[in-house]
Image (cartoon, rainbow, N blue to C red):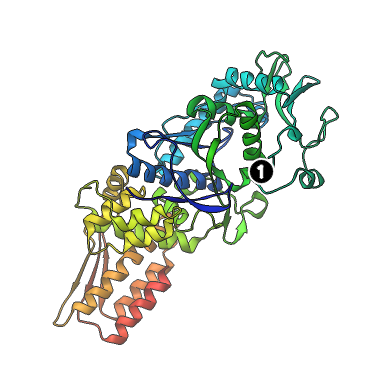
Amino acid sequence: MAEIRLYNTRTRAKEDFVPLDDKNVRMYVCGPTVYDRAHLGNARPVVVFDVLYRLLRHVYGADHVTYVRNFTDVDDKIIERAKRDGREISQITEETTRWYLEDMAALGALEPDQMPRATGFIGQMVTMIEELVAKGHAYEAEGHVLFAVESYKDYGKLSGRSVDDMIAGARVEVAPYKRNPMDFVLWKPSSDDQPGWDSPWGRGRPGWHIECSAMAYELLGESFDIHGGGIDLQFPHHENEIAQSACAHPEGAFARYWLHNEMLQVEGKKMSKSLGNFFTVRDLLDQGVPGEVIRFVMLSTHYRKPMDWTEKKRAEAAITIDYWHRLTTELEPSGAVPASVVSAMSDDLNTHLALVAVSALHSQPQMLLDAARFLGFLDDEAREHYRQMNLVEGVSVSVSGKDSDSTAKALSELRDTYIVAYKHAKKTKSFDKVDAAKKVLATMEIDVSVHVNSVEFRAKRPLDDQEIEYLHDLEEALK
């Protein structure tokens, strides 16, 4: 059995992963608030924890791993969106939940074992809040119920902050009914035009933080193995989850290992609408960027490092994915996973090293196929889509004359880049680059023929060393 080591945010150290029960490995990951399309940053934790899920299933067995990821379907943002669009809240949440699942599936993410919706666990939230009030960890004030932060001595340990420092730099709402500025809402009143449920404190709805604590307890128990999410959730969401859960169920450990992925940038800048670099997963998919390419770019960077989405990385990923497909298109998966890939993944999800290990298997296409599928690439749907795409089958290179091996090899290396450039030209209706490349190739007596499902390079003579070197320059120019 592979030995997995994971960086535990709570202890700030890489630790051996030892599950509470190797027959029942449990993981909870915070899911989306469903009111709009998932943007690229929303997708990063999905991909990160999908590969962890795959690793756990490989090591412990698919029947011995439970992965829970929730949907927050009651929230002020959802209420505002429903009012803005003049639609029912249920219509908004049903539609955006479906969008989310479709978009994440396009990235090769497996669906978790359980995907609870907050509105299905209101009763459990009320029960947990009642327990916190009874134990002196929460109090009622003006129709609200708030968690008393000072009642939990370990508050701030996950994020490494003291309560005094947090108060000094707080940007939270300091309502007059709060005993402490850092106290947070467990339950709040609902007006007649807002969704609400009956409770001991009147008609209302839960605060955001209590949702995950209640659902995790109900589905995974008072102690479970892994809790994950983006680094932006470390404080206050995860800090508050720990406080609530530890105080409501002090006999349990809640989550033992905490994993957080870093944030995402676009071309070196924070993604934001004001900068014009904000886009959703669906935006990219509709532009013709395959989900596998998005996944590859994300996994090229270690999850604990900021990830930069760039056009260069996208183009390079497209070439690699296309190459993997071309190598393995006639093969069927065996189900085996190369040890080099498992080893890389077992070292705190070193996905960059894992991708390098996959590419190193190019001389062993069967192993490459099995390794890529383990990481969520080259699944049946993607392979079928690849076979049906233009310019992926019947790609050929022919050279007339003796001593033509080096020319054929150089042209074979060029064709992947040419195909990507041609596909991009078709989408953008801008053929300047490929037309220029075709003219350059013609000067070297190389004909280029593009058909419905193929592209062919035909050299009338072998090229000399200088011409072959120029082909490499041409490849760079096409990127």
- Residue 393 in view (yes/no): no
Residue 111 horizontal/vertical position (percent) = 41, 35
Report helix, strand or loop for mark 1: helix
Residue 395 appears in the figure: yes
The image shows residue 343, relative to residue 400, as above or below, that is above
User: Is 387 on the left or on the right of 199, as rendered?
Assistant: left
Which residue does the numbered mark 1 point to in the structure image?
235
Q: Where is residue 467 in the image (x, y as percent from the top left)?
A: 30, 83
Q: Which of 87 and 70 is in front in this view?
A: 70
Write down the quadrant of residue 470 in the picture.
bottom left
Residue toward you, 105 or 117:
117
Left or right of residue 403, residue 113 in this image:
right
Q: How many marks?
A: 1
Give the residue drawn at x 24%, y 56%.
Answer: 367
Q: Quadrant location of residue 275? A: bottom right
Location of residue 467 with respect to 233 vertically, above or below: below
Residue sticking out furthest to the left: 402
Please state the horizontal and vertical placement of residue 189, each as a whole percent of the image: 73, 20
Residue sitting nearer the eye, 357 or 252: 252
Q: Which amino acid does label 1 sit on?
A: Phe
With 131 as the anchor, is 99 left or right in this view?
left
Q: Is residue 85 left or right of residue 404?
A: right
